[in-house]
């Protein structure tokens, strides 16, 4: 009697909405658990000034439940920015900018104008919409200006930002410009912020989230096929998405993380056409480069799991500590694995 072949999640998820939805729900639970686990340690690591800012903006403009990954995103980006600032002797206002940079999404989710309604009805990889990227960044910068004015009026003292407040606000307003083909408009200090922000896209939480979204987004699948990274010309495997991600961060094989399997996951410049901005953006500091290498090694292990496991439950059980370990790393806590 013949038996049906055992199919791994790397095949099931692109082809079946059932496992895809089950995996997404499990990922949301892990994201919620991560935020609950690390929230106190995260806020305690902030300066009093930044802690007050974070409390104010989180209360005034909470993220929509649809944006379930945004609170963990902020922990990853701000914590990465803290590591980069401390190691590279950069100005601390970059951390303040990191706290504010995506909060415009919360305003978009609660406003009642047409643009906001379009955002609220979004599906697929909606965060890659150019208009949304520009608008949320502008709204975040407006929040930054509101915060600056609030403190100047409240205390009459110099707030701990850069001498040129407009530079601080420009970094926020243009933080996503490299993703829409306008890298040159990003101020030099903004490039370090871009490194911290980009680290989320190669976190396990975001990588799995993006893969699930792309599998259900026909426009992204057409783009992936055009880039030649879809297996059998149809579906987007985790390893194919990994190829696209490494092309955005590494220019040469010699730049890839130590021990990288260039045969299984080669550096494919053609895959850049699938990425936002369509070009390679290597990290701008040794600290950012080190974190990037570690996160990519995590994605590689995750792809291997997806190619082996046939059960969503078993995969989530194995990937949860890997996700938590990335938070541990950024917050200088004892890694879980």
Image: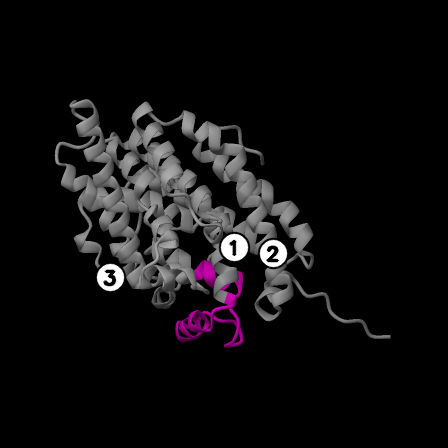
Percent from the top left, x then y, of residue 195?
Answer: 32, 45
Check whether the beta carbons of the residues at disc 2 and disc 1 lie within 8 A of each other.
yes
**Tag 2: Cα neighbours inside 10 Å, few (<14), some, or many (≥20)?**
many
Horizontally, residue 314 falls left or right of residue 276, namely right
Q: Residue at x 57, y 34 (%)?
A: 336
Q: Residue at x 45, y 64 (%)?
A: 123
Q: Residue at x 26, y 36 (%)?
A: 94
Say if 319 sits above or below 248 in the image.
above
The front one of 16 and 262 is: 16
The front one of 247 and 51 is: 51
Q: Earlier in the sequence, mark 1 or mark 3?
A: 3
Horizontally, residue 232 falls left or right of residue 85, namely right
Is residue 264 in view from this perspective?
no
Percent from the top left, x then y, of residue 70?
Answer: 43, 47
Q: Residue at x 23, y 49 (%)?
A: 173
Q: CA distance from mark 1 to mark 3?
A: 25 Å
Residue at mark 3? 181
Q: Earlier in the sequence, mark 2 or mark 1?
A: 2
Residue at mark 2? 23
Q: Residue furthest front?
A: 112
Q: In this picture, which residue range is highlighted in magenta?
A: 215-243
Percent from the top left, x then y, of residue 311?
Answer: 69, 57
Q: Residue furthest right?
A: 1
Q: For the residue labelled by badge 2, is the local secondary structure a helix, a strand or a loop?
A: helix
Q: Is residue 31 shown in magenta? A: no
**Tag 1: Cα neighbours inside 10 Å, few (<14), some, or many (≥20)?**
many
Q: Is residue 236 shown in magenta? A: yes
Residue at mark 1? 208
Say if 12 sits above or below 101 in the image.
below
Q: CA distance from mark 2 to mark 3?
A: 32 Å
Is residue 248 in view from this perspective?
yes
């Amino acid at each position: 009697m013949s038996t049906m072949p055992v199919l791994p999640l790397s095949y099931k998820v692109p082809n079946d909405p059932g496992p895809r939805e089950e995996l997404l729900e499990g990922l949301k639970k892990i994201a919620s658990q991560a935020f609950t686990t690390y929230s106190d340690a995260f806020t305690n690591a902030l300066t009093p000034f930044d802690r007050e800012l974070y409390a104010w903006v989180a209360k005034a403009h909470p993220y929509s439940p649809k944006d379930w990954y945004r609170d963990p995103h902020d922990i990853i980006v701000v914590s990465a920015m803290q590591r980069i600032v401390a190691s590279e002797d950069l100005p601390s206002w970059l951390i303040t900018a990191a706290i504010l940079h995506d909060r415009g999404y919360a305003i978009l989710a609660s406003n009642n104008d047409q643009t906001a309604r379009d955002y609220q009805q979004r599906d697929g990889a909606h965060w890659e919409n150019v208009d949304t990227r520009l608008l949320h960044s502008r709204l975040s910068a407006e929040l930054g200006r509101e915060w600056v004015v609030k403190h100047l009026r409240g205390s009459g003292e110099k707030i701990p930002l850069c001498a040129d407040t407009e530079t601080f606000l420009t970094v926020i307003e243009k933080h996503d410009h490299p993703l829409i083909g306008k890298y040159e408009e990003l101020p030099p200090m903004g490039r370090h912020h871009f490194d911290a922000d980009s680290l989320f896209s190669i976190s396990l939480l975001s990588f799995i989230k993006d893969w699930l979204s792309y599998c259900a987004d026909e426009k992204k699948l057409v783009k992936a096929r055009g880039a030649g990274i879809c297996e059998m010309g149809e579906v987007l495997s985790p390893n194919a998405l990994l190829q696209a991600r490494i092309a955005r961060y590494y220019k040469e094989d010699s730049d890839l993380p130590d021990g990288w399997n260039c045969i299984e996951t080669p550096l494919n410049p053609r895959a850049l056409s699938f990425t936002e901005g369509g070009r390679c953006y290597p990290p701008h500091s040794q600290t950012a480069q080190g974190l990037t290498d570690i996160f990519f090694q995590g994605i590689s292990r995750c792809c291997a799991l997806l190619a082996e496991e046939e059960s969503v439950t078993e995969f989530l059980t194995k990937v949860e500590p890997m996700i938590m370990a990335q938070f541990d790393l950024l917050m200088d806590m004892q890694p879980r694995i």
